Image (cartoon, grey):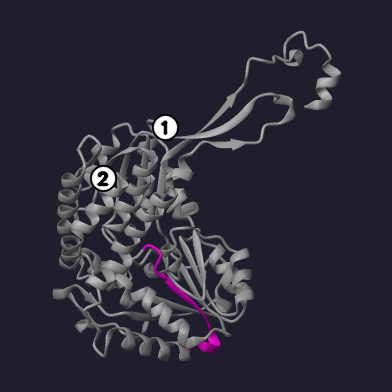
Amino acid sequence: MLKALLAAFEKWEKPLAEALWTDLHKSYEEAYITELSIVKAEIKNHLSHLKNWASPKLKATPIKMFPSVSRIVSEPLGNTLIIAPWNYPVQLLLNPLVGAISSGCTAILKPSPYVPHVSLVMNQMIADSFPPEYIGVVQGNRTVNQALLEHRFDLIFFTGSPSLGRMVMAAAAHHLTPVVLELGGKSPCIVDKDADIAVAAKRIAWGKTLNAGQTCIAPDYLLIHESVKDAFVRAFAKAVRQLHGEDISQSAHYVRMVNDRAFARVGDYLAEGTILYGGRTDASDRFIEPTLLDMNLCLADMKDGDRTAGKAVLREEIFGPVLPVITFSEHKQMVEYITGGEKPLALYYFGPKCRGWETIRHTSSGGACINDTIMHIANENIPFGGVGNSGMGHYHGRESFIAFSHRRSVVCTPTWLDLPFRYMPYKLFALVKKII
């Protein structure tokens, strides 16, 4: 079945890429790098390792249980529901499906209605490749989600916002259904005084303009040492021009906001600070230029409990190409600001590696990069997932197989020897007590 999915992916690659362009203005190159290639790599990783992952695992058995033998047997959880968002509609629907297939589960797929062309192609691809009783696709809006969540599943895999994640978890609680929640939050991006500013600016510009910032692990806000702020602004502007040309609105690789509602929401953030770079918008094209937004806020001057300064852009996950800028003067100020909020899905640090590890040790996030952004999601050999408000559970590679599996403990005891010590009336108890 994994091979059938890979073959389907090869067959439907062009229609999927065309649909991504139609719905999101996502170029083939970006679609391949951020969606198609990731799913292909995931399938191939499972094909290479599934036999090992699925085989029973012999585990050590203590002497008190002699002559028993202990194993862990993996079995499918059962019928699963996978609900995907619109921002990476191929990757975030099919990557979990790979885990469902490899573990032996059946699946109902619920793509997002905000990318109708992608969802239609996905429907056609699945119907062309698998029987509906094995993998089915259900289309519709949030009312359809609610109807699906009324049914009993053996696992619900949801990717979306924390607010919707709470609704999914509440619905799952009625049936004691386990959930994997891949949510989001405000992922901080830190630029320290000793950072390589040119490299930091280029990698942050790439991470923030990728999918026009409509990425759950995009840098959400910038914490920058006050001594390098001006240099970073210049370097960021240069980096954007290198990535997308002198006029980013003409770039073939710059995605548009998914709909008018998203455009209006993100556009409203521009009035909440001072524009250091960017700021152009075009409602007719749902275009928002990558924007550095100075919040005129230094952590050294921040009062206790005053995290947002009344600004929505500092409270809400931005999910767009606007990057608020906050300065700090000491490392501990930045750490205290991050730990004072919800645990983010990602954390990015630019500066000396030793201080990056120090930052990671004193904070918590779903994943992290030192001197990079986004790239931790590209490695199928390490788990991806959130923590706290940014989600629960992990997937990718072996973690996907485990997420959709029940790891069943089995003790096998032979009959050729039946030691009497465990039976009433517990003779030789003093000796047994020493053994156990």
Judged left or right of residue 255, residue 178 is: right
Check residue 130 for magenta coloring.
Answer: no
Is the Cβ of the residue at disc 2 closer than 8 Å to that at disc 1? no
Q: Amino acid at mark 1?
A: Leu
Please identify the residue farthest to the top as the structure is shown.
425
Q: How many marks?
A: 2
Judged left or right of residue 34, residue 352 is: right
Q: Position of residue 331 (x, y in %)?
A: 61, 76
Is residue 362 at all visible to an observer of this figure?
no
Q: Which mark is residue 176?
A: 1
Q: Position of residue 100 (x, y in %)?
A: 35, 43
Judged left or right of residue 420, residue 262 is: left
Whole-Å distance between the Cαs marked 2 and 1? 20 Å
Q: Nearer the viewer, residue 18 or 162?
A: 18
Q: Which mark is residue 109?
A: 2
The span shown in magenta is: 216-229
* Quarter location, residue 127: top left
